[in-house]
Image (tube, rainbow, N blue to C red):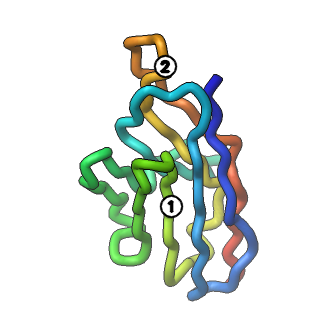
Amino acid sequence: QVQLVESGGGLVQAGGSLRLSCVAFGSIFTVNVMAWYRQAPGKQRELVASITSSGSTYYAESVKGRFSISRDNAKNIVDLQMNSLKPEDTAVYYCSADLTPERTFVVHRYWGQGTQVTVSS
């Protein structure tokens, strides 16, 4: 069994900061890309940032320069540091991991349960 568990969401004023954290645990062989997505009410889920096992990163244009993604490969943890938050960053944030469970040779994408981030103006 593999699970992703997120933490760190909450309510913050515009201009403030939050740090999200996600840990993948269970019977894991390898973890490839880890990422953060978000979904605002009435909108589609969108990719916010991703990071490969070698440390290559991707950021959506809307968060470049404000958000920073990092990971600890030994602990299967991915963090998202969010600075200069704006009301339009309000959404449910989901962690994802493309990983290979033990005793399989297939990469699956796993998702966390989501954590609410609300930015007040």
- Please name the residue shown 52% across and 41% down the image: 96
Q: What element carries label 2?
A: loop
In the displayed structure, 3 sits above or below 55; it is above
- Please name the residue shown 50% across and 49% down the image: 75
Question: Which percent across, then down, holds residue 39?
Answer: 60, 49
- The residue closer to the viewer here, 109 or 38, is 109
Q: Mark 1 points at which residue?
A: 79
Query: Label 1 is placed on what type of residue?
Result: Asp
Query: Label 2 is placed on what type of residue?
Result: Glu
The label on residue 107 is none
- The residue closer to the viewer here, 12 or 61, is 12
Which quadrant is the C terminus positioned in?
A: bottom right
Q: Name the residue under label 2.
A: 102
Q: What element carries label 1?
A: strand
- Sequence-earlier tag: 2 or 1: 1
Which quadrant is the N terminus positioned in?
A: top right
Label 2 environment density (alpha carbons within 10 Å; few <14, some 14–19, many ≥20): some
Q: Pointer 2 and pointer 1: residues touching (CB < 8 Å)?
A: no
